[in-house]
Amino acid sequence: MDNQGRIELAVIGAGYWGPNLVRNFTASGAAVVTHLCDLDLARATKVAAPYPAIQTTSDYQAVLASGVDAVAIATPVRTHFPLAKQALLAGKHVLVEKPLAWSVAEGEELVALAAERGRVLMCDHTFCYTGAVRKMREVVHSGELGDVLYFDSVRVNLGLIQSDVNVLWDLAPHDLSILDYVLPPHLRPVAVSAQGVDAVGTGFASVAYLTLHFDKPIIANVHANWLSPVKVRMTLVGGTKKMLVWDDNEPSEKVRIYDKGIEVGDQDPNRVRVSYRHGACFIPVLDSTEALARMAREFCTAITQGRAPETDGAAGLRVLRALEAANRSLESGGVRIDLG
């Protein structure tokens, strides 16, 4: 830490996400970004230009030897594991962009190594730090919805088509991390099944449907699609008492809670009596704090307090397990794969 008690942090990667991390950690007041590392030194220098105190380098080993307390890794997924492992071995706290690693085996090794070294390992599941998702969690955990019956999530748009991963690995980590965060720990999936189609010819599914199975009467679905004519970012959570809708494309009223549902009356052998309840719609006020700003503070606070962050390595590992099982299901024609 510096002489003001702030975490000394290095950002690794100056591409799409790295500049956002530099800005938010700098503004947090809880950290000081001392280094920005990228193989493209010119790009790192350009990003660091507004921050004269930041040293730029293309030498990752020099960063690890510099005495920084923590590193924030914003590099391609295949590099997450080797970079995070080296940092943990060097005694650094580590923040990794989603997904945590390229495989469950890699994720398990990182989680075990962080525990062994007593370091904080955090996955930047950014949506879990938005006001909307945090309100969803609050409502679900309070029991206001009653018993959760379903979780449906749609994340579709036209592009950007990836050439090295399927659409689930590209888009579904967001939805899986939200599901993991919003549902209580006793409602975690026990198996997944997935179906998809390679409609582009990349060798990977560009349209896919992921179903998560539970050992309780609840089901969850994620629809991920690179080929939709419109962009949809919507999640529905239905309960026995109320229902919740989150529309991330909605500019202001992103979360709505509907006092709607069905009530099943006395049954006879020939007919089920169902009545419909149509109550009011409530629109809660959401915290407007920028998600990355809250995430940056959570990482720093977890370090100073010596505790696990909200989206720790274990949460990142649960998402990885679902993604890896989804791959196996896709390859097997949609069979159910236990999460173990």
Image (cartoon, grey):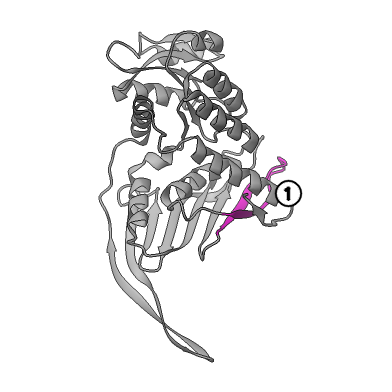
Q: Residue at x 27, y 43 (%)?
A: 287
In the image shown, does 206 or 121 lie closer to the viewer? 121
In the image shown, does 98 or 138 lie closer to the viewer? 138
Q: Which residue is mark 1?
A: 331
Measuring from the top left, give residue 315's x and y in whole percent: 49, 40
Q: Quadrant of the N terminus?
A: top left
Position of residue 233 in the picture relative to residue 40 (left or right)? left
Position of residue 335 in the picture relative to residue 243 (left or right)? right
Residue 198 shown in magenta: yes
Identified by mark 1, the residue type is Glu
Residue found at the far front of this picture:
116
Picture quadrant of residue 289? top left
Q: Residue at x 32, y 44 (%)?
A: 131
Picture quadrant of residue 307? top left
State the extent of the magenta-drawn residues as a range: 190-214
Measuring from the top left, give residue 122's x and y in whole percent: 46, 31
Determine if residue 157 is in view: yes
